[in-house]
C-alpha cells in the first residue's frame, strides 16, 4: 500500500470515529419508561379494568326470577284450569291433586304434541264426549293463554305428563307462538283503549 493510500485510509478512519463520537449516546433500557400492565396486581391490591360501557351489572338470577311470572298462569286462571280439568277427567269433586305433574308445576311446561292421547290412556278415557271436554279445557284454560304461548316461544323442549323433556320445540311452532303473543298483546291494547273510551 502506498503512502498516499495509508494517509487517505487513516484520514477516513479518523473522520468516521469523529462522526460516531459526535452523536448522542442512546438511552439505556433503565431510563426508558414503558406503560406495561403487570401480569399480577401487587399483594392486597385489586386491579380494576374499565368496562367499555357504563351499564350497571345485572344479577342474572334476579333478572330471570323477575321474568318468571311471564311463564305462569294467573292464580285465578290456574285454579279454574286445574278444577275444570279434574272434573273433565272424572276425578272426585274436582280433586286436582291427582292430576299429572306437568299441570301442577309452578311454571308452565310446554306440552308434548298429542299429550291429550297420553292423558286419555292414563285415565282410561274412551268416551268421545268426555274427550272433547278434556281437549276443550286444555285449549281454553292453557294452550291459548298468553303465558303458555310465551313458554312455547322462549322454551326449548316439550314435556310429557311426568314433566320429563321428550322433544325439542320446532322453529315453526316457535314462530307461530311469537305471532300468537303479538296478536294477544294487540287484543289487550284494543280492549284497554275501548275501556278508556267508555270511562
Image (spheres, rainbow, N blue to C red):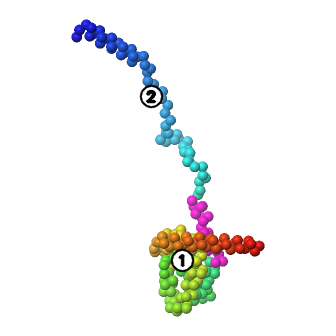
Percent from the top left, x then y, of residue 78? 62, 77
Q: Pointer 2 and pointer 1: residues touching (CB < 8 Å)?
A: no
Q: Residue at x 39, y 18 (%)?
A: 20
Magenta-drawn stretch contains 22: no
Q: Is residue 35 above or below residue 62?
A: above
Query: Which callout, 2 or 1, points at the residue further toward the start of the chain?
Result: 2
Q: Residue at x 63, y 71 (%)?
A: 186
Count of residue discs: 2
In this rendering, would 67 be left or right of 32? right
Q: In this figure, which residue is indicated by the disc labeled 1?
A: 102
Q: Is any atom of residue 186 visible in this view? A: yes
Percent from the top left, x then y, of residue 54? 60, 49
Q: Secondary structure at mark 1?
A: helix
Residue 48 placement: quadrant: top right
Q: Which residues are magenta?
A: 60-77
Q: Residues within 10 Å of mark 2 (few under 14, many from 20)?
A: few
Q: Residues within 10 Å of mark 1 (few under 14, many from 20)?
A: some
Residue 105 placement: quadrant: bottom right
Closer to us: 187 or 129: 187
**Disc number at residue 29?**
2
In this rendering, would 14 be left or right of 95? left
Q: Is residue 15 above or below residue 40?
A: above
Q: Residue at x 55, y 91 (%)?
A: 129
Q: Residue at x 57, y 59 (%)?
A: 60
Percent from the top left, x then y, of residue 16? 36, 16
The quadrant of the picture occupied by the C terminus is bottom right
The outermost residue toward the left is: 1
The quadrant of the picture occupied by the N terminus is top left
Amino acid at each position: 500500500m502506498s503512502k498516499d493510500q495509508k494517509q487517505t485510509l487513516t484520514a477516513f478512519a479518523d473522520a468516521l470515529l469523529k462522526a460516531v463520537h459526535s452523536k448522542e449516546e442512546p438511552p439505556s433500557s433503565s431510563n426508558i419508561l414503558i406503560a406495561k400492565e403487570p401480569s399480577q396486581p401487587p399483594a392486597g391490591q385489586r386491579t380494576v379494568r374499565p368496562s367499555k360501557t357504563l351499564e350497571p351489572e345485572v344479577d342474572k338470577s334476579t333478572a330471570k326470577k323477575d321474568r318468571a311470572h311471564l311463564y305462569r298462569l294467573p292464580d285465578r286462571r290456574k285454579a279454574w284450569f286445574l278444577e275444570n280439568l279434574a272434573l273433565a277427567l272424572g276425578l272426585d269433586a274436582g280433586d286436582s291433586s291427582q292430576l299429572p305433574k306437568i299441570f301442577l308445576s309452578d311454571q308452565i311446561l310446554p306440552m308434548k304434541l298429542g299429550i291429550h292421547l297420553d292423558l286419555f290412556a292414563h285415565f282410561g278415557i274412551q268416551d268421545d264426549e268426555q274427550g272433547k271436554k278434556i281437549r276443550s279445557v286444555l285449549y281454553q284454560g292453557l294452550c291459548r293463554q298468553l303465558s303458555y304461548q310465551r313458554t312455547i316461544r322462549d322454551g326449548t323442549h316439550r314435556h310429557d305428563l311426568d314433566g320429563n323433556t321428550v322433544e325439542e320445540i320446532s322453529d315453526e311452532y316457535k314462530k307461530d307462538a311469537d305471532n300468537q303473543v303479538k296478536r294477544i298483546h294487540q287484543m289487550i291494547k284494543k280492549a284497554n283503549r275501548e275501556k278508556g273510551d267508555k270511562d
